[in-house]
Image: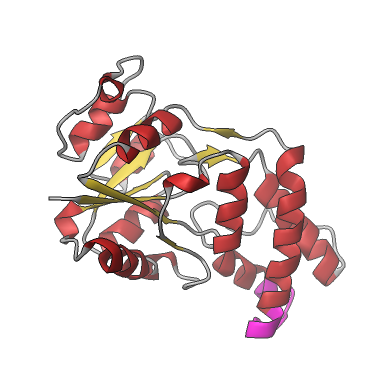
Amino acid sequence: MRKLLLFDIDGTLLTSGGAGEKALSLAVKDCFGVDDDLADVEIAGRTDSGIARQIFAKYGQEASVDNLAAFYDVYLRHLEQQLPRTRGLVLPGIVEVLESLERRDDVAVGLLTGNLSRGAELKLAHYGVWDFFEFGAFADDHHDRNELGPFARKRAGDRYGEFAPENIFVIGDTPHDVACGRAIGAQTIALATGRYSAGDLRACGADFVFEDLANIAPFIESLGLAAQTTGDLADDAFGVG
């Protein structure tokens, strides 16, 4: 049966080299007139819309639809400018994994990300991996990450038919990603490529934990898929199940 793979972006597929955080700080400067490094705002694993709500609460501003939309516009403008100025990268093995999955007919690949849809496109296009993803769920859909899974599942279902929870895999790098997967009964794959260690991710209940995806074979095996190409069998790194 076809498996549905839903990828987080930041810390999972790539690092933007701080472009996102810098763009947020610049947006705060433009919208609220203050310099703020946002050290007291939780960012990792949170949605852009949730982060914006934290910022609005910090400055005592109403998080109305219009106010948030204006803030997003400023943030996205700065993000587009900052991406070429920072030293980000696609994380180890990601391109090889995505190319391998693209060759298969037993998987569907989408996004389940806290980025706004436009922000996701800006980041992934800048690093050359946007075209691997046909659909996704984004911060535009809901500010609570645990509410995003049903959006992704429905969009996948519209294209491919219904996916049973046991055939859905949420792939991310934070406990928030694991919780998001759990919220829809999906299996969870956590990568220790962000701020959390493999031990942290095992402790929060991830079904599978990998240091990174530099070795494709253990990742493919965790999905319950048979190896189909030599690219699936790379053995230049290791995973931790």
On screen, residue 119 versus residue 220, left or right, reads right
Q: Image point 21% across, 61% down: which residue? A: 185
Q: Residue at x 84, y 65 (%)?
A: 30
Left or right position of 161 against 102: left
Is 202 placed left or right of 53 in the picture?
Answer: left
Residue 65's quadrant in the figure? Answer: bottom right
On the rendered structure, is 29 left or right of 163?
A: right
- In the rendered image, the vertical position of residue 189 relative to residue 181, given as above or below: above
Q: Residue furthest left?
A: 1
* Residue 199 in view of the camera: yes
Query: With respect to residue 138, does 196 lie above or below?
Result: above
Query: Of residues 135 and 9, which is closer to you in this image?
Result: 135
Q: Magenta stretch: residue 63 in it?
A: yes
Give the residues drawn in magenta, as a range: 56-67
- How many labels sit on residues? 0
Up/down of 113 relative to 173, above or below: below
Q: Quadrant of the C terminus?
A: top left
Would you identify the image quadrant in which residue 23 lies?
bottom right
Q: At 44% from the left edge and 50% from the top edge, which residue is drawn?
A: 8
Q: Position of residue 207 (x, y in %)?
A: 23, 44
Say if the magenta span includes residue 220. no
Measured as percent of width and height from the top left, residue 20 is found at 66, 50
Asked whether the viewer can see residue 241, the reply is no
Comparing 107 with 193, the one in front is 107
In this view, the residue farthest toward the top is 236
Which x, y percent locates residue 147?
38, 71
What kind of colouring is applied to the model shown? secondary structure
For this orientation, the residue located farthest to the right is: 33
Q: Quadrant of residue 231?
A: top left
Q: Residue at x 51, y 47 (%)?
A: 130
